[in-house]
Image (tube, grey):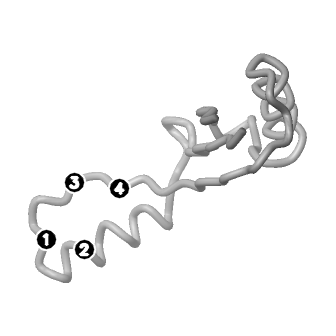
Amino acid sequence: MKALVHITLKKGVLDPQGKAIGHALLGLGFPSVGDVRQGKFIEIELAETDESRARDAVKQMCERLLANTVIENYAIELRP
């Protein structure tokens, strides 16, 4: 089973890297670009076959290491 984890900054948390990306895109001639927020994408291959146990394990990974839950949100997607 494969777990796809999307980690993004919570609303209200300053995102200087997102701002820099937005300014760069405007400078490259993309005038329709508005607010840009950046994040992380992590792909994890799991030996687990039970979806519920896999989701619980990945949630623990996010809570303990992958995401700073004070300032970041995460979303888990599981694929067979």
At label 4, the amino acid type is Val
Picture coordinates of residue 60, whole percent (x, y): 87, 31
Badge 2, how many Cα within 10 Å: few under 14, some, many 20+? some
Picture coordinates of residue 37, whole percent (x, y): 42, 53
* Residue 34 or residue 80, whichever sits in front: 80
Image quadrant where residue 64 sits: top right
Image quadrant where residue 18 sits: bottom left
Badge 3, how many Cα within 10 Å: few under 14, some, many 20+? few
Q: CA distance from mark 2 to mark 3?
A: 10 Å
Residue highlighted by disc 2: 25
Q: Give the residue drawn at x 61%, y 45%.
A: 7
Badge 1, how many Cα within 10 Å: few under 14, some, many 20+? few
Q: CA distance from mark 1 to mark 3?
A: 10 Å
Q: CA distance from mark 4 to mark 3?
A: 6 Å
Element on which disc 3 rests: loop
Whether residue 44 is situated above or below residue 48 in the rendered picture: below
Residue highlighted by disc 4: 36
At label 2, the amino acid type is Leu
Residue highlighted by disc 1: 30
Sequence-first tag of 2 and 1: 2
Element on which disc 1 rests: loop
